Image (cartoon, rainbow, N blue to C red):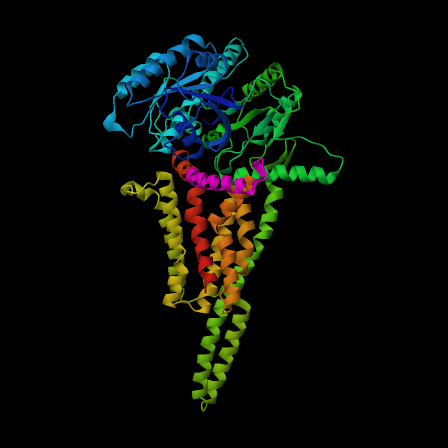
């Protein structure tokens, strides 16, 4: 039920009104409660119709719903009232074990089609598939009735599986939006068709399934075969796509346009395209906002600085996630510059006429039509503090470089210390041998000169010496990366394992396996302590190599996705510099707590709590934590899903790059 579509579309993000109809006892109230609370209530009795207001988190977007649960029998008066009131979706339910409820659903559907002239959608739902032994309505009968009523058809079990209910609601609702989208796209395409100044082809794209639909279309357009996303055959193609504008309008009355630029894996469109969109909107009197924050000019410099900082940090959070902020985010992967313009309705403000928006939109397409080459003159790496100000790569990379000076110096220091300890041991052995040869003055003088020479070389060039024995350290590093690989592949191994007999949803099973593998890998320092194979010198060498690997990781990630590398450094640099082997139990416990806080699962949870606190419009901390818990599990599952379907890097980079190196510092903290 995500309210995003690509192309020139009209989106509806106001309250979605849903009416559930059907004979008494088919499970209307159970469906409502199951969808809102994920719980099944077998015995539910209500004497009056009830209207439930709910903010559903669907496809990572908060969707306001108003569900009207009609109880009892649907009389003529009740149906007349339902037909006169505007509703976006009618769900007609029947029980597969009750023939009379099926006949009642036919009557209800025909009544709505004949007496409701509004723009609405309808879904036919057969409930109680868990009672297959008592089935009286064949699935083919339900399919035939849905074709007669021109609606979608589902067979679900409200009692057995919540995911059947969730899928039905997700799939039924967008069809209402798709109808509005296609109508708007058709009208704009007819307007463009009669203009003779177009030198390039213009493609109007309306898809379903959001990013997956965009991915499917782009793969087929470029002739790419995907293992997981199958595309229907495309009958015609144009040339290379130069740019894309994803327009999302939430209402006929909008107050401003919000511009979204974050694409897949932190990619950004060329700054020239962003400036073009902003200036054309402003020239037509259309207010432009960034991150839902309008452009503001304060008399106090501190207030303006604080507003710009909050806008930039919000952009960095979205960029660091690696997920596209809208459907435009998949185009840059194919070398196509793209942005999203999303209409916003702000309370207490006036509305912008569609004629102004149309002139601005036409100006954007005419500018792209006149472009003789690809975007290349401006920046591809930047941070936006407002629609008129940006921070270039030349300004934000040096501070990160200064932050990483600490790990570099610490790595050199640990390397020198590990070499010095070994050289001192060798020096003690040489002194013992020289004491035995005390009678030979010539040999003694020669050995003293050699020792002085080696000591001088040690002091001047200790950091250039290579340790002779680092096999034990290498085994620890390989073990850490093996643990990361184990966590990475653990969800994929579920394909070869039968589902457990106890009631556990597939998504919960994936989370259970991931956290189980993480806890298993966290036992690595205890195995190292049992073996007692690492000396203090080896620990120093391990920390030195780990810091070098960590510095390379942050540098490479910051080059591709600066926000990701920046937040990684901010959360982990102080901890990694503080950790070293110690005999003090209090310090060791403190180190363990610090490293636990800097672990990837905890960092993700902390950022989720912060996001929920600022986006949830409530002061109830219990509700904030509940929302954070839901977002946390959904975020982990979506990162795994998106890494397979649309190619995000968040999951593989975290499991194969960041987590293995964190395990090395986790082991050092226990030593």
- Residue 336 colored magenta? no
Note whether 137 is above or below 655 in the view shown: above
Give percent across and percent down for residue 357: 60, 18
**Which residue shows up at 43% across the image and 39% down it?**
639
The residue sitting at the left extreme is 133
How would you classify the magenta stretch by its main secondary structure? helix
Residue 5 location in percent, x, y? 48, 24
Residue 57 against residue 592 in the figure, above or below? above
Query: Looking at the image, is 490 positioned above or below residue 415?
Result: above
Which residue is at a point 50% across and 23% down the rendered structure image? 16
Q: Residue 301 in the image: state x and y as whole percent.
A: 74, 39
Say which of 614 and 268 sits in front.
Answer: 614
Image quadrant where one finds the N terminus:
top left
Question: Which residue occupies the extreme right position in the image?
Answer: 299
Which quadrant of the figure has residue 137? top left
- Is residue 475 visible in the rendered structure shown here? yes
Toward which corner of the image does residue 256 lie, by quadrant? top right
Q: What is the quadrant of the C terminus in the image?
A: bottom left
Magenta region: 613-639
Does the image show residue 336?
no
Q: Residue furthest front?
A: 47
Question: 264 or 15, which lies in front?
Answer: 15
Tell me where residue 28 appears, x and y as whole percent.
Answer: 39, 25
Report if residue 636 lies within the magenta region. yes
């Amino acid at each position: 039920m995500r309210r995003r579509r690509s192309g020139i579309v009209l989106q509806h993000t106001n309250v979605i009104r849903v009416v559930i109809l059907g004979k008494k006892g088919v499970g209307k109230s159970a469906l409502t409660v199951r969808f809102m609370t994920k719980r099944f209530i077998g015995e539910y009795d209500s004497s009056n119709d009830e209207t439930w207001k709910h903010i559903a988190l669907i496809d990572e977007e908060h969707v306001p719903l108003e569900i009207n649960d009609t109880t009892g029998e649907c009389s003529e008066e009740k149906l007349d009232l339902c037909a006169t009131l505007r509703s976006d979706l009618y769900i007609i339910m029947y029980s597969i074990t009750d023939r009379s409820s099926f006949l009642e659903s036919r009557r209800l559907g025909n009544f709505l089609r004949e007496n409701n002239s509004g723009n609405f959608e309808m879904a036919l739902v057969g409930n109680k598939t868990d009672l297959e032994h008592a089935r009286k309505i064949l699935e083919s009968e339900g399919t035939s009735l849905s074709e007669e009523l021109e609606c979608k058809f589902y067979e679900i079990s409200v009692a057995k599986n919540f995911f059947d209910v969730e899928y039905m609601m997700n799939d039924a609702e967008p069809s209402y939006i798709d109808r509005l989208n296609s109508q708007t796209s058709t009208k704009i395409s007819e307007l463009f068709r009669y203009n003779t100044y177009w030198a390039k082809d213009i493609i109007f794209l309306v898809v379903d399934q959001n990013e997956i639909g965009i991915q499917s279309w782009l793969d087929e357009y470029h002739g790419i075969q995907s293992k997981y996303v199958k595309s229907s055959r495309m009958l015609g193609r144009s040339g290379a796509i130069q740019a894309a504008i994803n327009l999302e309008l939430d209402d006929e009355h909008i107050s401003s346009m919000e511009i979204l630029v974050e694409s897949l894996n932190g990619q950004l469109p060329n700054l020239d395209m962003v400036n073009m969109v902003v200036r054309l909107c402003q020239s037509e009197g259309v207010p432009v906002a960034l991150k839902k924050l309008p452009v503001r000019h304060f008399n106090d410099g501190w207030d303006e600085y604080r507003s710009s900082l909050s806008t930039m940090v919000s952009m960095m959070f979205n960029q660091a996630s690696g997920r596209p902020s809208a459907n435009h985010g998949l185009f840059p992967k194919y070398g196509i510059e793209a942005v999203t313009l999303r209409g916003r309705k702000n309370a207490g403000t006036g509305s912008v006429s569609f004629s102004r928006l149309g002139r601005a939109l036409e100006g954007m397409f005419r500018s792209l039509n006149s472009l003789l080459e690809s975007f290349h003159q401006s920046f591809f790496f930047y941070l936006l503090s407002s629609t008129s100000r940006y921070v270039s790569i030349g300004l934000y990379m040096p501070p990160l470089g200064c932050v990483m000076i600490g790990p570099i110096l610490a790595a050199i220091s640990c390397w020198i210390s590990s070499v010095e300890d070994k050289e001192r041991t060798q020096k003690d052995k040489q002194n013992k041998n020289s004491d035995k040869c005390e009678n030979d003055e010539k040999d003694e003088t020669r050995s003293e000169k050699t020792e002085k020479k080696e000591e001088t070389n040690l002091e001047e060039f200790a950091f250039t010496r290579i340790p002779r024995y680092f096999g034990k350290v290498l085994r620890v590093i390989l073990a850490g990366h093996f643990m990361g690989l184990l966590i990475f592949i653990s969800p994929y191994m579920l394909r070869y394992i039968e589902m457990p007999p106890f009631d556990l949803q597939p998504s919960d099973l994936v989370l259970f396996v991931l956290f189980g593998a993480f806890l298993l890998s966290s036992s690595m320092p205890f195995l190292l302590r049992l073996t007692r194979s690492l000396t203090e010198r080896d620990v120093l060498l391990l920390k030195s190599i780990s810091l070098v690997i960590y510095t390379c990781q942050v540098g490479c990630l910051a080059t591709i996705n600066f926000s990701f590398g920046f937040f990684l450094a901010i959360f982990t640099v102080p901890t990694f510099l503080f950790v070293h082997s110690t005999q003090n139990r209090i310090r060791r416990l403190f180190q363990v707590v610090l490293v636990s806080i800097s672990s990837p699962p905890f960092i993700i949870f902390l950022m989720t709590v912060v996001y929920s606190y600022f986006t949830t419009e409530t002061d109830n901390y219990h509700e904030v934590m509940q929302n954070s818990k839901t977002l946390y599990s959904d975020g982990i599952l979506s990162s795994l899903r998106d890494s397979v379907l649309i190619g995000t890097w968040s999951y593989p980079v975290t499991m194969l790059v960041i987590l293995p190196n964190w395990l090395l510092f986790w082991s050092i903290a226990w030593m």
